[in-house]
Image: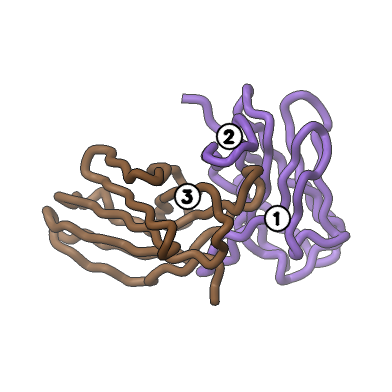
Chain colours: A purple, B brown
Amino acid sequence: EPEVTQTPSHQVTQMGQEVILRCVPISNHLYFYWYRQILGQKVEFLVSFYNNEISEKSEIFDDQFSVERPDGSNFTLKIRSTKLEDSAMYFCASSRQGAYGQPQHFGDGTRLSIL
Amino acid sequence: RKEVEQDPGPFNVPEGATVAFNCTYSNSASQSFFWYRQDCRKEPKLLMSVYSSGNEDGRFTAQLNRASQYISLLIRDSKLSDSATYLCVVNTGPRNNDMRFGAGTRLTVKP
């Protein structure tokens, strides 16, 4: 069964440094998403991406965050100047369509630890 | 009121028991509904979509009550492998971009 893959599985970074999290969505999916989950808390929506542009973002997704689809397969999340509170599990997801009723499929996440 | 609210549990049940989880959502414009399960420190995995007429997948039954803004998940004949956190997920539509997760209900099935 096709799956969403994420790299790295664990990233440790010094506060203030830039970090790039990578995702390869399912190949025939057109909509891509990033979520985060702080340890012990609920999954929170960050951003959705379609047709090479952001279609929606949450209040968490401020100017320090950006997303990109640099080629036909990768989808990246960049955090420009990391803060301690950015420590979380980051999940990428994709869906075939954006119409309601289409479930999203999640990658197994990148654990980001900011020191 | 929280956008998606679930009883956090934990629910501790013996193998073979029937257990039900409830979820309420605040946005009456919500269009689609899902149950995901999440194992400890793993990604959410789709368990089932929830349809207006209710739907069943093996031991799992999902119900939706739009008037009360309420979703339920029933697990029959629970197995040890059902132990996980069950996430209620609601999207406000019409696009699939605004998925809101409940905090999850933790289930432990014991021998």
The secondary structure type at the circle numbered 3 is: strand
C-alpha gap between disc 1 and disc 3: 19 Å
Residue B11 visible within the image = yes
Give the number of the mark in front: 2 or 3: 3
Image point (77%, 24%), residue name: A72
Residue under mark 3: which chain is it in? B
**In the image, residue B19 above or below residue A3:** below
Q: Residues within 10 Å of mark 1 (few under 14, many from 20)?
A: many
Between discs 2 and 1, the one toward the N terminus: 2
Residue at the front extreme, as displayed? B67
Image point (34%, 44%), residue name: B53
Q: Residues within 10 Å of mark 3 (few under 14, many from 20)?
A: many
Q: Residues within 10 Å of mark 2 (few under 14, many from 20)?
A: some
Residue wearing tag 2: A4
User: Disc 2, disc 3: CB below 8 Å?
Assistant: no
Residue under mark 1: which chain is it in? A
The secondary structure type at the circle numbered 2 is: loop
Residue in front for this viewpoint, B38 or B102: B102
Residue wearing tag 3: B33
Q: Quadrant of residue A16?
A: bottom right
The secondary structure type at the circle numbered 1 is: strand
Give the number of the mark in front: 2 or 1: 1
Q: Where's residue B78, x and y in %?
A: 18, 52
- Taking the image as shown, residue A20 lies to the left or right of residue B41, namely right
Residue wearing tag 1: A46
Residue type at the position of mark 1: Leu
Residue type at the position of mark 3: Phe
Residue in front for this viewpoint, B13 or A84: B13
